[in-house]
Image (cartoon, helix red, strand yellow):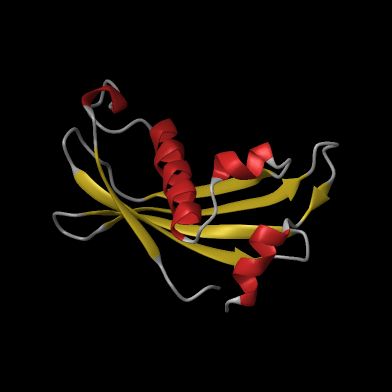
Amino acid sequence: MISDIFSIAFKVRDYECDMQGIVNNTNFLHYLEHARHEYLKSVGLDFAELTKKGVFLVVRRTEIDYLLPLRSNDTFYVTCELFRISPLRFGFKQEIFRKVDDRKVASAHVFGTSINKDGKPFLAKEIDNLFAKE
């Protein structure tokens, strides 16, 4: 795993909550995705630019453990760590913490790869280079 843990702050918006007054579980996927994109930017990669080059980063599987609820106006942060799975696959260990008490709200593993314009998997050199920095 790459040693630096990336972190980004968020605030729950009213429309992200369901009838129970807690953040709907599908919104956690948005939080995690946004954190991954911002992580990539922080290491010099832009998701949109990679796409323009024909490098399509895709999620193959996501595992999420929901531990505590988030409610409207809660502030929280999402962490992100990149790790290698195989020559063609990589993953992100991500966690969500409430800011007020620093309690873990959710824990996730997101597994992905990159594919080319023909839909064939490959590990893009831009991603592979991140592991060379370990």
Residue furthest to the bottom: 134
Horizontally, is 66 left or right of 61 in the view?
left
Which quarter shows the N terminus? Answer: bottom right
Image-quadrant location for residue 4? bottom left
Nearest to the observer: residue 83 or residue 123: 123
Residue 12 vertical placement versus 115 (above, below): above
- Residue 115 is situated, as x and y percent measured from the top left of the image, at 76, 45
- Residue 44 is situated, as x and y percent measured from the top left of the image, at 51, 58
Q: In percent of the image, x 44 and y 58: which residue is there?
A: 42
Nearest to the observer: residue 43 or residue 111: 43
- Residue 129 is situated, as x and y percent measured from the top left of the image, at 65, 68
Which quarter shows the C terminus? Answer: bottom right
Residue 54 vertical placement versus 41 (above, below): above
Nearest to the observer: residue 95 or residue 65: 95
Q: What is the count of numbered marks?
A: 0
Q: In percent of the image, x 19 and y 32: which residue is there?
A: 72
Image-quadrant location for residue 52? top right
Q: In percent of the image, x 57 and y 46: which residue is there?
A: 62
- Residue 33 is situated, as x and y percent measured from the top left of the image, at 48, 43
Horizontally, is 121 left or right of 7 in the view?
right
Residue 99 vertical placement versus 20 (above, below): below
Q: In percent of the image, x 54 and y 63: which residue is there?
A: 82
